[in-house]
Image (spheres, helix red, strand yellow):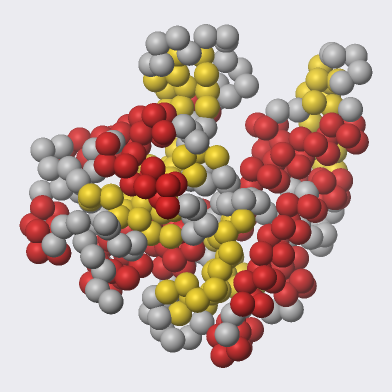
Amino acid sequence: MALRRGLSSRWRGFLGRWSQDIAIDLGTANTLVYVRGRGIVVREPSVVARDKVSGAVLAIGEEAKAMLGRTPPGIDAIRPLKDGVIADFDVAEEMLRYFIHRVHRRRAFVHPTVAIGIPSGVTEVERRAVRDATLRAGAREALLIEEPMAAAIGAGLPVSSPTGSMVVDIGGGTSEVAVIALNGVVAGRSVRVAGDEIDEAIVSYMHYEFDLAIGIRMAEHIKLAIGSAYPMDEEERVTIARGRDLVSGLPRSVEVSEAQIREGIVEPLRGIVEAIKATLEETPAELSADVMERGIVLTGGGALLRGIDRMLKEEMQMPVRAAEDPMSCVVIGAGRALEQMDKFAEAFEPVG
């Protein structure tokens, strides 16, 4: 069935000559922007700082992230997305407007078409919220593409082929699991277990094992420094965790090991494993054989967790590898789909 469009392909092509159409990976943790013909031009945290009284936006991106957990009473530093969907519509709109204008200001007299990635498990209301926020932020047209499809295109998987490919996109708010063939998702799962839940698991672990209260930024630092999903061959690593002693209320530092953090993040990793197994159980036999032979491709920031490929390989008994640039796959895939609309038209959701 032909995909319905808000604009005809001829009219879109005419307007495209006068605008810089863009793709956006509007992530819970980070926002990436891809400009047609230029590639990725923005990679910033999805954080906005605003005045509590006036509502005025004070900072967006890296500058705002630096304020998380450190703001005075009159300022909020917030993430407008939670679990991959918009939690604060007005702030998300402001953030989108900032990024769109930042890359499109030279040709502002023609608004851009914006391709934007969304989790596959969101509701129709949540999809409409993303589309409406994108249009109100300055887009001429908002085209939605599900993140696992965009990730597969960005990772270079043969999504148009009848051969089955499996992608696992582990982002900040959601993990997207999908088996793709003939430009469609044949079987899939979207679970709200991803990088944020891993950070929260580290916060809980430090609380219960060390009587130490730490913030999300410290948990993220620990994850990046010594986080792993599988015992590694090299010498055990350690790092220093700094926070507030839950007994004395005073600042305290403790040394924490890689093995301890691995123990602390077992539960969220188990949730991702279960989503993969459930997807494989729903996959037709012929495509399952393809996946067994070709293996699983990991994308998203979670693919950078040390040993996660080895852990999944042992759990699934099949090849597992990370994409070449896992954190960029969704935005690259959305951008390529926008650039090659004739080839990837079916990847976008119908408008209407």
The x and y percentages for residue 242 are 78, 26
Does residue 65 appear left or right of residue 183 in this picture?
A: right
Residue 313's place in the image compared with 65, above or below, is below
Q: Quadrant of residue 161?
A: bottom left
Does residue 232 appear left or right of residue 14 in this picture?
A: right
Which sits in the foreground, 137 or 199?
137
Which sits in the foreground, 187 or 163?
187
Residue 5's place in the image compared with 129, above or below, is below
The x and y percentages for residue 245 are 86, 20
Quadrant holding the N terminus: bottom left
The x and y percentages for residue 256 are 85, 38
Which sits in the foreground, 177 or 298?
177
Which sits in the foreground, 105 or 177?
177
The x and y percentages for residue 55 are 41, 16
Which residue is at 47% across, 72% downward?
Answer: 185
Which residue is at 52% across, 46% downward?
Answer: 84
Does residue 324 appear left or right of residue 35 in this picture?
A: right
Q: Quadrant of residue 276?
A: bottom right
- Looking at the rendered structure, the number of numbered marks drawn on it comes to 0
Which residue is at 42% across, 74% downward?
Answer: 184
Residue 243's place in the image compared with 11, above or below, is above
Which residue is at 39% across, 29% downward?
Answer: 90
Quadrant holding the C terminus: bottom left
Query: Do we see residue 228 in this rendering?
Result: no
Query: Do we see residue 288 in this rendering?
Result: yes
